[in-house]
Amino acid sequence: MPGFEVIGKEELQNLTKIFKYGGGVLFRFGFEKLRKNSYLVKKFEYKFRKKFGSKYSLAVSSGTAALRVALASLDIKKNDEVITQCFTFVATVEAIVESGALPICTEIDQTFNMCPKDLEKKISKKTKAVIVVHMLGVPANLKEIKKICKKKKIFLIEDTAWGIGGSFQKKYLGTIGDIGTFSFDFAKTLTTGEGGMLLFKNKNICKRAQAWHDHGHENKPRLKRWEDTRRSSGFNFRMTELQAAVGLAQLKKFDKIFLKHKKNKDKVLSVIKNIKHIKYRTIPKDSIDASESIIFSFSEESKAKLFRKKLLEYKYSTKILPEATTWHFAGHWKHIKSLDRNSVFDYPKSYELLKRSVSIPVSFSMKRSFPKILKNVILNIL
Ligand SMILES: *Cc1c(COP(=O)(O)O)cnc(C)c1O
């Protein structure tokens, strides 16, 4: 979770430059004379797609917006179905609801991500897209899921909000499906306060997304903005120059963040890996995780709850599991009316696994004493 841990003078310098040299222009389009060639959102899009190896990119106002724009660019609408997984952040399902399509959730497996077998069962004639989530940094079983989507001719979107920097078969997460979406909210690996990004394989899908996120504007270079062409309506999910200024500084820190994360995760694992009676989350073959968290399961729910309580006594916290499943597990989403499977009993396998699992956040500035404390807390409970 280091975005906010490493925010500092580089971000401030970039922001100041907008006012010193860029005429104080905060809008991503127009004001050609005033801005003196300072196009930060455009530059952020370029640097981001170069870094993660994609041909097309679009910056937006949040990770939730990225998901909504992704669905619009694939022309998802009423009477379509979109499948995601029951363990995710509520935004994934909200984006489907907002698109007008019916949200369907699958069970998770030992990867704590979409279960490919359940995905196959839940695909219908109406299924248009799948949103797979690399929840808390571990890649989903992309090999199987991609195969299924290809066979059924269904679009694959990767919600990479937690998976940035992780990879599958040497390709970065977010570049394997048709679209990858990213979040830069304040809890994510890179932060712009609020912000998001999409990566695309296909130029036309990217073009549709660009237009839809800006009221349908096709942004024809030779036309004035008010004379611009459009083919569909859209919405406003534009990123501002302020967000991009911060994002560019954060992106420069990414490799350092990623390595430090991995190092800290490995330090923790080296101390706790031999403890018996806890079971670690599975990382799929040929996959590298984003070192966002360490998830393991106890034999029963009471132990997971006690673990969190004991850890808090040392002023350390868990992350999402076990305390925040109400926001991250579809079994608790009775308030989403179009989600017909919204009871914990609709996802029996996932519920059984989630309720006895805990997630340890990996931080940039981890204290040296943390792995030992963690080990003692676990041993104390077993
Ligand atoms: C954070 C998050 C989002 C939403 O991103 P925002 O930038 O907060 O809108 C979507 N999906 C997942 C899995 C997330 O963790």
Image: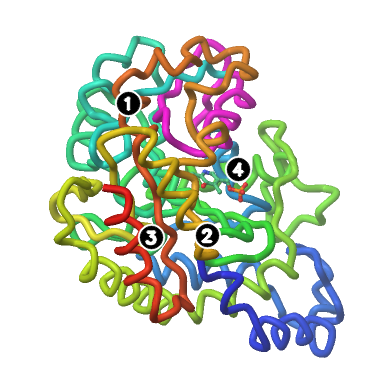
Residue at image mark 3: 54
Q: Earlier in the sequence, mark 3 or mark 1?
A: 3
| Residue closer to the observer: 366 or 336 | 366
Residue located at (69% from left, 53% from top)? 219
Q: CA distance from mark 3 to mark 4?
A: 20 Å
Judged left or right of residue 157, residue 92 is right
Of the residues shown, which amino acid type is indicated by label 4? Thr
Please tell me how crowded label 2 is: few (under 14), some (14-19), or many (20+) other residues with Cα within 10 Å. few
- State yes or no: residue 227 in magenta: no
Q: CA distance from mark 3 to mark 1?
A: 38 Å
Residue at image mark 2: 313
Q: Is mark 4 within 8 Å of ligand 1?
A: yes
Please tell me how crowded label 4 is: few (under 14), some (14-19), or many (20+) other residues with Cα within 10 Å. many
Residue 114 locus on image (x, y percent): 31, 33
Residue at image mark 4: 64
Q: CA distance from mark 2 to mark 3?
A: 45 Å
Q: Is mark 2 within 8 Å of ligand 1?
A: no
Give the magenta-colored segment's residue range.
73-100
Q: Single out the mark in the foreground, 3 or 4.
A: 4
- State yes or no: residue 81 in magenta: yes
Residue located at (26% from left, 47% from top)? 382
User: Mark 4 and 2 residues: CB-CB less than 8 Å, in contact?
Assistant: no
Please tell me whether mark 3 sits on a helix, a strand or a loop.
loop
Please tell me how crowded label 3 is: few (under 14), some (14-19), or many (20+) other residues with Cα within 10 Å. many
Residue located at (50% from left, 16% from top)? 342
Q: Single out the mark in the foreground, 2 or 3.
A: 2
Q: Earlier in the sequence, mark 4 or mark 2?
A: 4
Q: Is mark 1 within 8 Å of ligand 1?
A: no
